[in-house]
């Protein structure tokens, strides 16, 4: 019986994001609340994590329902786009026209909306036919991982702030002077603040754009390794 819960993509692009999101809360509880360190709690936590990850995925879909991400790879195929040189683009057009008779429009590229729609269709076809390409999938997982980080940025900041609130709440019997003199409290506080800074400074659209472009180049480059029948 196959009991595999997550495939490689889900682990690297989704589950790892969810772990990063809840990490400050878990680390704070682990450091400040001894019962959390038990083996039984760890088992229960893993089970909850598996279930909760599905909710976060649903929440992410809801947050992104009105979010429009440009199809960077398709745009690179547009006749007027300059990211790919004319010679390479011409080779890609020829390759696509030979791949499927539905792509005959690539024999006569134009700036029309019809051609741009064909570019988007070709990219979707290319994604479906490069699932075994290791380079493409590596770039895809990295791009998907960061895209998920960016889309859940607000949730990540909220969880990091909650971790700080938990730390302060658990330490309430201690006055503020004793709180700051405690190496454990200060260590956990630094970790929680680091997570806040990570989400604010380390998760941004500039990095996403770079990864988006890398994925686009890898996906289009896969055309050179594919046979004319796909």
Image (tube, grey):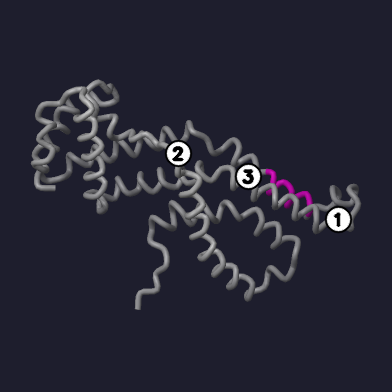
Kindly identify the residue that appears in the image at 74 percent across and 48 percent down: 189
115 versus 58 height, above or below:
above
Check if mark 1's residue and mark 3's residue have beta carbons within 8 Å.
Answer: no
Residue nearest the observer in this picture, 2 or 88 = 2
Q: Residues within 10 Å of mark 3 (few under 14, many from 20)?
A: some
Which residue: 42% across, 33% down?
209
Highlighted magenta segment, given as a residue range? 185-193
**Is residue 51 found left or right of 91 in the rendered image?**
right
CB within 8 Å, label 2 to label 3: no
Local SS, label 1: loop
Mark 1 or mark 3: which comes first in sequence?
A: 3
Give yes or no for residue 158 being in the magenta stretch. Answer: no
Give the image location of residue 65, x and y in percent. 45, 44
Residue 192 colored in magenta in the image: yes
Which labelled disc corresponds to residue 157? 3
Query: Which element carries disc 2, helix, strand or loop?
Result: loop
Q: Quadrant of the N terminus?
A: bottom left
Disc 2: which residue: 67
Q: For the point 41% across and 46% down, which residue is it?
A: 144
Secondary structure predominantly adopted by residues drawn in magenta: helix
Residue 172 image label: 1
| Residue at 72% across, 46% down | 190
């Amino acid at each position: 019986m196959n009991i595999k819960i997550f495939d490689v993509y889900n682990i690297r692009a989704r589950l790892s994001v969810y772990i990063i999101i809840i990490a400050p809360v878990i680390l704070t509880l682990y450091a400040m609340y001894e019962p959390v360190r038990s083996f039984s709690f760890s088992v229960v936590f893993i089970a909850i994590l598996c279930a909760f990850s599905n909710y976060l995925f649903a929440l992410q879909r809801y947050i992104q329902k009105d979010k429009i991400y440009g199809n960077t790879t398709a745009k690179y195929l547009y006749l007027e786009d300059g990211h790919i040189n004319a010679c390479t683009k011409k080779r890609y057009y020829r390759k696509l026209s030979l791949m499927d008779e539905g792509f005959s429009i690539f024999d006569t590229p134009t700036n029309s909306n019809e051609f741009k729609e064909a570019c988007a269709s070709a990219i979707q076809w290319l994604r479906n036919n490069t699932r075994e390409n290791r380079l493409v999938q590596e770039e895809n997982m990295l791009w998907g991982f960061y895209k998920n980080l960016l889309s859940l940025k607000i949730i990540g900041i909220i969880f990091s702030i909650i971790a700080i609130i938990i730390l302060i709440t658990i330490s309430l019997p201690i006055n503020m002077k004793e709180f700051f003199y405690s190496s454990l409290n200060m260590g956990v506080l630094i970790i929680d603040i680091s997570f806040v800074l990570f989400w604010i400074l380390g998760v941004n659209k500039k990095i996403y754009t770079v990864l988006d472009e890398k994925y686009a180049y890898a996906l289009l480059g896969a055309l050179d390794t594919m046979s004319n029948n796909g």
